Image (cartoon, helix red, strand yellow):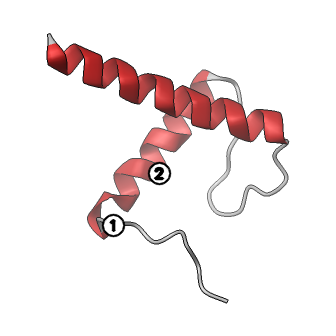
Amino acid sequence: MTSNNRHVVPEAANGLEKFKMESASEVGVNLKQGYNGDLTSREAGSVGGQMVKKMIKSYEEGLK
């Protein structure tokens, strides 16, 4: 079995992990380093949603 979780830019992995942890903290989800398979779908979705929301906001601010 191969993993599909390869980063296109491996050097960005640490920044992405930090971004994910910050986003989780903002929505009140307690992430730990490593495996987080015990999260509910709602918790995981709220972290991903917060990340997307922040990326869109950053992009829109860059257009101004």
Amino acid at dot 1 = Val
Amino acid type at circle 2 is Glu
Q: Which residue is mark 2?
A: 17
Q: Position of residue 33 (x, y in %)?
A: 62, 57
Mark closer to the chain start, 1 or 2: 1
* x then y, percent, for residue 51: 50, 33
Residue at numbered disc 1: 8
Q: Residue at x 43, y 24 (%)?
A: 54
Secondary structure of residue under mark 1: loop
Callout 1 touching callout 2 (CB < 8 Å): no
**Label 2 neighbourhood size at 10 Å, few (<14), some (14-19), many (20+)?**
few
Q: Position of residue 36 (x, y in %)?
A: 74, 55
Nearer-the-camera pick, 64 or 12: 64
Q: Residue at x 31, y 58 (%)?
A: 12
What residue is at 68 percent from the left and 44 percent from the top? Answer: 31
Quadrant of the image occupied by residue 19: top left
In the displayed orientation, state which residue is furthest to the top.
64
Q: In the image, 54: left or right of 47? A: left
- Element at label 2: helix
In what quadrant of the picture does the N terminus appear? bottom right
Q: CA distance from mark 1 to mark 2?
A: 14 Å
> In the rendered image, which quarter is residue 49 located in?
top right
Q: Residue at x 71, y 62 (%)?
A: 35
In the picture, measured across the screen, residue 24 lies left or right of residue 39, that is: left
